[in-house]
Amino acid sequence: MISQILFILFFITLAVGAVLAIYFGARAYGSGKKAREPAARKPFRVGLIVAGVAILGLAFIPGSFHQVETGTVAVVRRLGKIEGVRNPGTYFDFYLTRSYEIYDTKVQQDRIVTSAYSKDGQTMELEVFLQYQVQTENIMKIATEYGNLNALQARIETVTVEKTKAVMSSAEAMTIVQNRSAFSNDVSESVREGISADYYVNVRDVVLTNIDFTNEFEKAVEDKVIAEQEKQASITRAEAELEVAKLEAQRKIAEAEGNAEAQKIIAQAAAEAASSKLIELSRSIGYNVTTEYIYKTTVDKVYGSGKEEVTKTEQVSPTKLAETTTVVISEEDGDTVTTTTTLALEATKHTIDVTSGPGVEKFKTLVEDYMKYLAYLETCNGELPDVVAGDNAVSIIIPSEPNP
């Protein structure tokens, strides 16, 4: 800015001096007596001097003012040899002996586009976004080793391309498609390592912003993704159908188990009823029948520490006892113990003395006739058998099935 202002001022001075020299020259050396007088030649000389001074100033002074803007530094060369570095500001150095080379110290943003091949030979178009900043303390080294900032930038771009291609060529295309973010991280790490301290820059960011494969490969990937989605959908449907089938099978198993349990309960009830009837018949015709009750006592101890102890014992009683449950809370060695004692009827045992009363053979006949009676009841057509009780025996008369 200062050099431009000085250039304008010197140019105006030159113009003024030239006008004065021409004007007074015309008067001094023009026609007429007055023009030939020596006194008329002084203004002409003044004009020439002013113009000469303006020419000298225009030639040397404005070009020697140098302004270094904020965000830049200047490398000063004196007759081609690096002399030093100038920080932002305005300086006066004679331009014929010193030159200024401006280096941008702001963060540089570089978008690098290149092509590469994957491990399986697929073509890729890659775009890498690179941010770096030159180290101001090493500007003179950059100027000495690289000549200028453009040469350094070209070298950094070359390293970025080489490192990016090396990373991307190490994997197959499908792997790259499935792990784009991971490869972006690998490229960033590789480029940062490649741009070593010899380049005198600080790398701010490296991002693999885009990976483009050929249209044919992109179509193949899309078809594969669709096929995989359809496969997954089929698997999901099959799993759902299998789950339904499992649930249905479980339902049928549960239903069958329920029916079996019901049949078991019914059979048990029928057996108990039949046994009771047989015992009553035995008593009614003179057999001695004794009854005993089998009880189970369960003692469950639960300790506050989580420990649990369970003990079970059986006892036989000739008389029927009341079923009870008692709970007692006590202390044992500083631990709270909850003791639950349960007395429950486990079974009832009837013993028939077949040697008493009518004897063993009569009892066998009684049992056989009674079993026939029960079998008949299962297929009864509505005609009940006749039961005749005598002094020494009970007769059951079962109607025979009619001949077809």
Image (cartoon, rainbow, N blue to C red):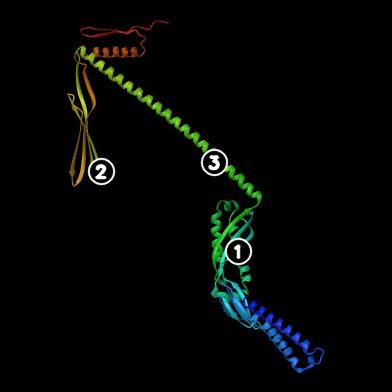
Marks 3, 2: nearer the viewer:
3
Most foreground residue, 301 or 158: 158
Find numbered disc 3 in the image and state the secondary structure of the residue it sits on: helix
| Residue 245 x, y percent position in the rendering | 47, 32
Quarter of the image with the N terminus is bottom right
Mark 3 nearby-residue class (10 Å; few <14, some 14–19, many ≥20): few
| Residue 47 x, y percent position in the rendering | 72, 87
Picture residue at 28% right of the left edge, 20% below the top: 272
Left or right relative to 71: residue 309 = left
Mark 2 nearby-residue class (10 Å; few <14, some 14–19, many ≥20): few
Left or right relative to 190: residue 298 = left
Read off the residue under disc 3: 232
Most foreground residue, 174 or 8: 8
Most foreground residue, 145 or 241: 145
Q: Who comes first in sequence, dot 3 or dot 1?
A: 1
Q: Amino acid at mark 2?
A: Lys
Marks 2, 1: nearer the viewer:
1
Q: Who comes first in sequence, dot 2 or dot 1?
A: 1
- Which of the 4 image quadrants contains residue 9? bottom right
Read off the residue under disc 2: 307
Q: Amino acid at mark 3?
A: Gln
Q: Amino acid at mark 1?
A: Asp
Left or right relative to 56: residue 261 = left
Picture residue at 59% right of the left edge, 43% below the top: 226
| Residue 143 x, y percent position in the rendering | 60, 76
Whether residue 292 is visible, yes or no, is yes
Q: Mark 2 and mark 1: span between their CA atoms?
A: 72 Å
Mark 1 nearby-residue class (10 Å; few <14, some 14–19, many ≥20): some
Picture residue at 62% right of the left edge, 54% below the top: 212
Read off the residue under disc 1: 110
